Image (spheres, rainbow, N blue to C red):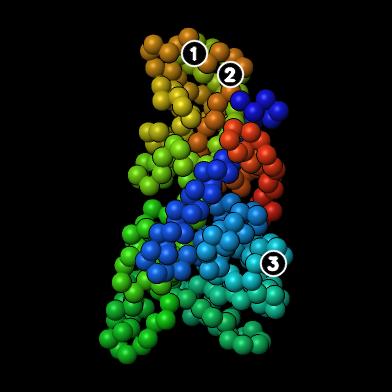
Amino acid sequence: MYPELDTPALVIDLDAVRANIMEMAESAAKHGVRLRPHIKTHKMPELARMQLDAGAGGITCAKLGEAEVMADAGIDDILLAFPVWGEPKLRRLAALRERARIRVSLDSPEVAAGLGRLGGPPVEVLVEVDTGQHRLGRPPGRPTAELCARDGIELREISVGCTPTARHAAGVAGVTEIRPGTYIFNDTAMMRLGVATERTAAARVLTTVIARPTPERVVFDAGTKCLTSDGYGTPGWIRAVGLPYLHMEFLNEEHAVAHLEPGHHGELPVGTRAQLIPSHACSALNLFDLAYGVENGQVTTELRGAARGAVR
C-alpha cells in the first residue's frame, strides 16, 4: 500500500474528493442556492479552485490568515465567518479588501464598530444567529429572518452551514447560500451522522503496525499528532479502512492502540500498513505540512497545506 511513502503520511483520495465536490455542487444547484464551501477543512488553494470550478460561488474562511493565502492564490470572493477584532486584524482586513471582495460575519456591536472605522466602501456583513450550537450568534429574535420580514426589512442573503445539514438547508425556503466544509473529505463524525461512508471518506492517515504485544493488541505509528484527540472514546471514532474487526482503544502522542476481534488475532503482523480515517478531518489536516494525492490507488501528486497553522 503506497510503498513509496514513509509513514505516518496523510493520503487524500482525489477520486473521492472530486465525487464529493460534485455531489454537493449538484445538491446546491438543484435547490437554486449558492455554494460557498468552507476551506478550513483542507486549507489548500488547489482544492478550493476545484470547488470553484465545479460551481461554487466563492469560499468561506475562518481566519484572516486563511483568507490571505486564498487571495494570494487569486480567489477574490471570500466570506470571513469569524469576528474581526483588534487594530492589527483591521489593518490586515483593509489590505485584503484591496485584492478581493470580503464579507464578514459578526454578532456584536463592538465588532461592527471596528469595521465601521475602516476607510473605503462599507464592509459587507452578515449577522450571525445562534441556531443551536451555542457558540457564536445572537439569540433567536430580532436578527431572525421571519421577524425582520414582518418589520419590512428585506434580507437579501440567508447563509447557513454546515456539512451534516447542508443538503437539507439548501431546500429550506429563504436560504440563499450554504457553507459546508467537511464534505470534501468527510470523517468518522460524518459517518456516524449518516452523511458519509468509508468510500466517501477521502482523507486518511497511512500508518504502519509497529508492535503486536498481545494477540489482540495492535499498535500503529500514528497518534494524536496525526489524528488529533477529537472524538476520543466515541464508538467508531477512528476507523481503519477495510478492517471492520479492528477497534481503536486510545491514542498517545505517537501511538494508536487498537484491538482485534476474536477470530482475527492472527492478522495484521508487524509491518502491515493501514489507512485510518480520523474523527475530525479539519483538525487532522492542520497537523500535516504535506499530503499525498492518490488516484486509482496510485500516488499522483503532492499537496501542501498552504494555510496550515493560519490561526490569526
- The numbered mark, 3 or 2, whose residue comes first in the sequence reads 3
Residue at 70 percent of width and 43 percent of height: 302
**Residue ID at (54%, 80%):** 124
CB atoms at circles 3 and 1 under 8 Å apart? Answer: no
Q: x, y (%) of residue 33?
A: 42, 69
Going by the numbered disc 1, the residue's amino acid type is Glu
Q: Residue furthest bottom?
A: 152
Q: Secondary structure at mark 1?
A: loop
Up the image or down, 269 lies above or below 202; here it is above
Residue 267 badge: 1
- The residue tagged 2 is 272
Whole-percent x and y of residue 164? 38, 53
Q: Is residue 27 left or right of residue 4?
A: left
Front label number (3 vs 1): 3
Q: Name the N-terminal-most of marks 3 and 1.
A: 3
Residue sitting at 70 percent across and 78 percent down?
98
Q: Which residue is mark 3?
A: 74
User: Which of the 4 image quarters holds residue 152?
Assistant: bottom left
Mark 2: which amino acid? Answer: Thr
* Image position of 52 with respect to 97: above or below: above
> Which element carries disc 2, helix, strand or loop?
loop
Give, as a three-letter code, the residue at label 3: Gly
